[in-house]
Amino acid sequence: MKFQPDRIEGVNVITGYTSASINVNAQPWDCSVIVPFQGDILAWPCARFDELAESHFEPLLALRPELVIVGSGRQHRFVPPVLVRALIAKGIGVESMDTQAACRTYNILAGESRRVVAALLLD
């Protein structure tokens, strides 16, 4: 017996992941992406974890999430706190995990109507 729909109307859902692409709402993206709980999916102009800079996290502030999940690629790597200090200063939680785990976690939280944003790196 199902207790909730497969997709909540108006909520973005990650529908697939490979090391070369991320599908959001059944649309493939072959670059790093920002997936907000609701609204437009954005290309994230960072190709690799080692290239992350504080400026890569600035667009996330405008989305006003309660939590940001950073998918660090195939490996789990922690984002240095200095890069996300603007998010932390606003009381926004930041979690790091490998991109596959980030996709799953995002879907669970979005399905609970949480104001979550996934910032997902492909590598």
Image (spheres, rainbow, N blue to C red):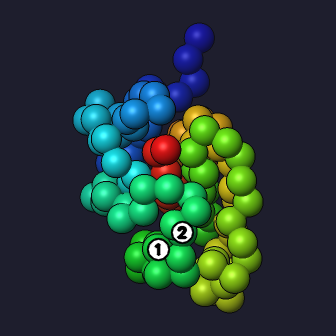
Cα–Cα span, label 1 and label 2: 6 Å
Residue found 29% across the figure and 31% down from its top: 26
Q: Residue at x 49, y 44 (%)?
A: 123
Among the 4 quarters of the image, the one containing residue 68: bottom right
Q: Which residue does the numbered mark 2 point to in the structure image?
A: 52
Mark 1–mark 2 CB contact (< 8 Å): yes
Seen at 54% across and 69% down, the residue is 52
Examine the rendered structure and indicate whether residue 6 appears above or below residue 64. above
**Residue annotated with mark 1:** 56
Task: Estimate the x, y position of residue 2 in percent, counting from the top left.
Answer: 55, 17
Residue 55 in percent (x, y) is at 47, 81
Q: Mark 2: few, some, or many residues within 10 Å (few <14, many ≥20)?
A: some
Q: Amino acid at mark 1?
A: His
Depth check: give the residue in front, 51 or 77: 51
Regarding mark 1 in the picture, which secondary structure is present there? helix
- Horizontally, is 15 left or right of 40 in the view? right
